[in-house]
Structure formats: structure tokens, C-alpha cells
Amino acid sequence: MGNRLEAFYGDLDEKYLQGDLTAVERFLLESIRQAEKTPQGSRDELIAIYNELGSFYRGISRYAQSIAAFEKARALAVLDPGRDSGQYATILNNMAGTCRLTKDYDTAIALFREAAGIYRRAGLQDTYAYASVLNNMALVYREAEQYPEAIGCLKQALGMIENMPGHMHEVAVTYNNLTALYSAAGDRMQAMQCLQRALQAFEKCSDEENVHYAAGLNSLAAFLYAEGDCERAIAVYRKSAKYTLRFFGENIEYGITCQNMSHVYEKMGRKTDAAAALERAKKVYENLFGPEHERTRAAEDDLQRLRKASGA
């Protein structure tokens, strides 16, 4: 079974690198069908594939399907290896990430805390998996505007990750998240220090092309914009949009990035570019949520305002 899982992950990585999201989904679903035909050792294989399927659907903003896939992985993991396993905790961590994106913060925090408790009881509190739970929990606290709690989680995670070899990208993202938190909390000096550390860490990353790089760039660009550095902000937003589009297609994060680019362009006085970026965002929201969704309508209202201001 180990060889099959190793081959599965290798093939999955190749599918992602090709950038064909339909092919990725088709591969994952077919992998599930094949695993279900394998009587011996198929449970661990199915858990792994359902976990990847949940992460895939989360990445392309299909949240109900993401939760459903994680629930299937969770149901299998309850039977074996059980509720006290690291594998079960990983599923909870991933499911909580989807709950965060749907703004179900109470459920997300409960799942993250359950996962953290499992890791501690298993003696895994010094692992990257445990640090990942702390990082993800910080995102929930940040969105709920509980900044001291979020900063506490990130500082604890950072203290662990910095001592782990091979995790420079995670160090960069954590410093980047701390930049945004200190900025939101009004501590500009700490924010600037973390920004410099984030930039230094990103420059040391050996492989920027991964599915998480865009998120780090996006929040970094937001800080640069808030600091008034529009030229650098737009350059970073462009790179963020490129990676998001490559790995996840036109998901909600891509739409938000385009909308953020519109704000920067408008501040720079480039209203034509601002309108074009906002038009892309509106189309993304419309495709994902429909023409009457609040995001779509807000983007359309903003677009009309821009056009009126530019005389278009």
C-alpha cells in the first residue's frame, strides 16, 4: 500500500503542476474508485485520497463538497487508526480550514482545538503538524478580530518552525501573517520588523511554485498597499494572482486578488486598469456565486462608480 500511496502523491503533484483542474478532480475521483476495489489496506489509501479531495475542493471554493470529502475521511479514520491518531487530527485540521472559509468560526476553533489536543496527547506537540494547527487557528482569531489570541498562536508556531529544517516557506508565511496581525493591531514597528523577516525568508525559499505561496504574497501586498507603497503592492498582487490562477483557477481568492488590484490601481490614478481588474473580479464572483450574490453586486456597483468617474 505504501508504494501505491507514494505513486498517488507523485501523480497528483504532476497533475497540479500541469494546471488542469478538471484533470486533477478526475484523477482524485478515479483514485477513490480504484481504492474501493482494493480489499486489503484500502482504508488508509481512501483516507489519504478523500483528504486530498477535500483540500482540492476547498482550493477551488467548492466548500460543501470539501466538507463532504473530509467527513468521509473522518468516518474512515474513526474506525482505524482511531480518534487519538495523528491522521485523525490532520483531517480535523483540514476540515477546520474549510469551516474558516465559510466563516463558521466556532466550528473551526472547536475542530482546531480538538486536533491540537490529539497531537499533544500523542506527544507530537513539537512537530510541524502541531505548528500548522496553531497557524490555522491564528487565521480564525484574526478574522474574528481577536488579535492578541492570533498573535500568541503565531508566535508559538514560529518558535517551533524556525528550528525545523526544510520549512523556510512556512517561516516566511508565518512572518507574513504576523505582519498583517501587528498592522491590524496598530503596532506598526512590529509589523515592519516582521515584514522584513518575511521578505528575507521568501527570498531563501528554494521552490516558490507551490499551492500556498499565493496566499503569503496576497497578504504581503495588502500590507504594502496600507503603507502606501503602491508600485510594490501591485507587483506582488500580480504574482499572487498568477500562482492562484495556476494552481486553483478562478476561485474566490483569485477574485479577491483582482479586486484588491483594482483598489491599488485606483489609488495610483490608473482608472482603466482598475476597472479591468474589477471586471475580472466580478466575473469570478458571478461564476462562483451567481449574479445576485452580495460579492457580485458589490463589485458591479464599484465598477459602475469607476466607469462614471472616468467618463466611460
Image: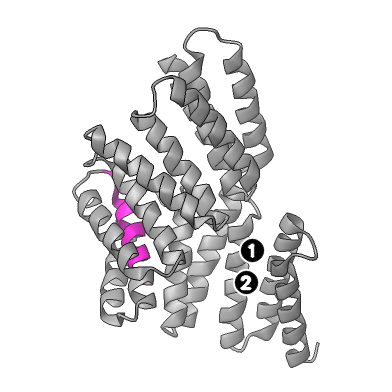
Q: Which residue lies at the image location 25% right of the left edge and 39% below the top edge? A: 120
Q: Is residue 103 left or right of residue 272?
A: left
Q: Provide the residue designation for mark 2.
A: 259
Q: Position of residue 14 (x, y in %)?
A: 53, 34
Q: Provide the residue designation for mark 1.
A: 255
Q: Quadrant of residue 201?
A: bottom left
Q: Position of residue 44 (x, y in %)?
A: 46, 20
Q: Is the C-beta separation of discs 2 and 1 under 8 Å?
A: yes
Q: Which residue lies at the image location 59% right of the left edge and 80% below the top edge? A: 263
Q: Position of residue 212 (x, y in %)?
A: 46, 51
- Measure the alpha-carbon separation of dots 2 and 1: 6 Å
Q: Which residue lies at the image location 47% right of the left edge and 58% below the top edge? A: 215
Q: Is residue 56 left or right of residue 273?
A: left
Q: Is residue 30 left or right of residue 214?
A: right
Q: Is residue 63 above or below residue 187?
A: above
Q: Is residue 18 visible?
A: no
Q: Is residue 269 visible?
A: yes
Q: Quadrant of residue 26?
A: top right
At numbered mark 2, what does the secondary structure look like: helix, strand or loop?
Answer: helix
For badge 1, the amino acid type reads: Gly
| Range covered by the magenta-colored residues | 166-179
Q: Is residue 235 left or right of residue 282?
A: left
Q: Is residue 13 above or below residue 211?
A: above
Q: Which residue lies at the image location 35% right of the left edge and 54% below the top edge? A: 135
